[in-house]
Image (cartoon, grey):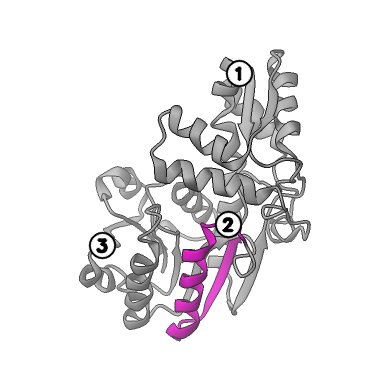
Amino acid sequence: MYAVTGASGQLGRLVIENLLGKVAPEKIVALARDPAKIADLKTRGITVRTFNYDSPSTLAPALEGVEHLLVISSSEVGRRTEQHRAVIEAAAVSGVTFLAYTSILHADTSPLGLAVEHLATEALLEKSGVPYALLRNGWYTENYTASAPIALQHGALLGSTGNGRISAASRADYAEAAAIVLTQANPAKAIYELAGDESFTLADFAQAITDISGKPVEYHDLPEAEYKAALISAGLPDWLAELLANSSARASGGALFDDSHTLSSLIEHPTTPMRSTLEKALQA
């Protein structure tokens, strides 16, 4: 059986849809903290189980019969390492024969603060004895398209990325890759550095918003501290503003760039262009 944690999330849902195109629904287990959010999957023949990273004793029973497990990283930054430890230990005792984990692009060399917990999780996997693959995902294009409406409203896109290039891909691209790796007949230990075929600067992104909407949007590059302050002024909590500002500033040095084309090779088609994802977001 194939199981996906975080199945109620945006990435998890997309992975499930991809799995349905590869295996019978009765071979799929959707795991979520709140199974009510994915109750609709039951009507499609998928097994739905409660899976709470914060309840370690319940995790192994929820993995009964699961052979291949996709662990989508927790959204709780600062608590991820211990949560992931609980899942990995449960996988080891429940008989999981292969585990794929959604890490971060170039986790072993990344200067992003977000990389710390991902790298710690990778170390836990190495010690676990469970065969695994690392899906080191780059940024989702949706990370940027979500801010497009605000940029349009103010005619400005803020960041600290300078001329750093970002090799983003759509969430759907990463989900497709995860389903492919999870359903391999003879999976082997592997590290996949996954990123979009095309890269862009935030100035490029602002220009794309302008081109598509017909309304002028300019990119304003700010020092990291000023960008963080702007995010806090916009209503973001301090910890999230710190995380976003750090990521943006580190991207100025190429932390989110990759030209290996590993993702498109894995899914056997070009990754979704930034403008295509942006157009859909603006239409919505």
Q: Is residue 222 magenta?
A: no
Residue 98 visible in the picture: yes
Q: Nearer the viewer, residue 4 or 33?
A: 33
The amino acid marked with disc number 3 is Asp
Q: Are marks 1 and 3 in contact (CB under 8 Å)?
A: no
Provide the residue designation for mark 2: 112
Which of the two marks, 3 or 2, is nearer to us in this view? 2
Q: Residue at x 46, y 85 (%)?
A: 127
Q: Is residue 117 magenta?
A: yes
Query: Are there few (<14), some (14-19), or many (20+) residues within 10 Å of tag 3?
Result: some
* Residue 245 spot, x, y in % from top left: 55, 43
Q: Nearer the viewer, residue 221 or 71?
A: 221
* Magenta span of residues: 111-136
Q: Residue at x 40, y 52 (%)?
A: 75
* Residue 132 spot, x, y in % from top left: 52, 76
* Residue 216 spot, x, y in % from top left: 71, 15
Provide the residue designation for mark 3: 54
Q: Quadrant of residue 134?
A: bottom right
Q: Is residue 159 above or below residue 255?
A: above
Residue 172 visible in the picture: no
Provide the residue designation for mark 1: 152
The amino acid marked with disc number 2 is Leu
Dot 2 lies on which element?
loop
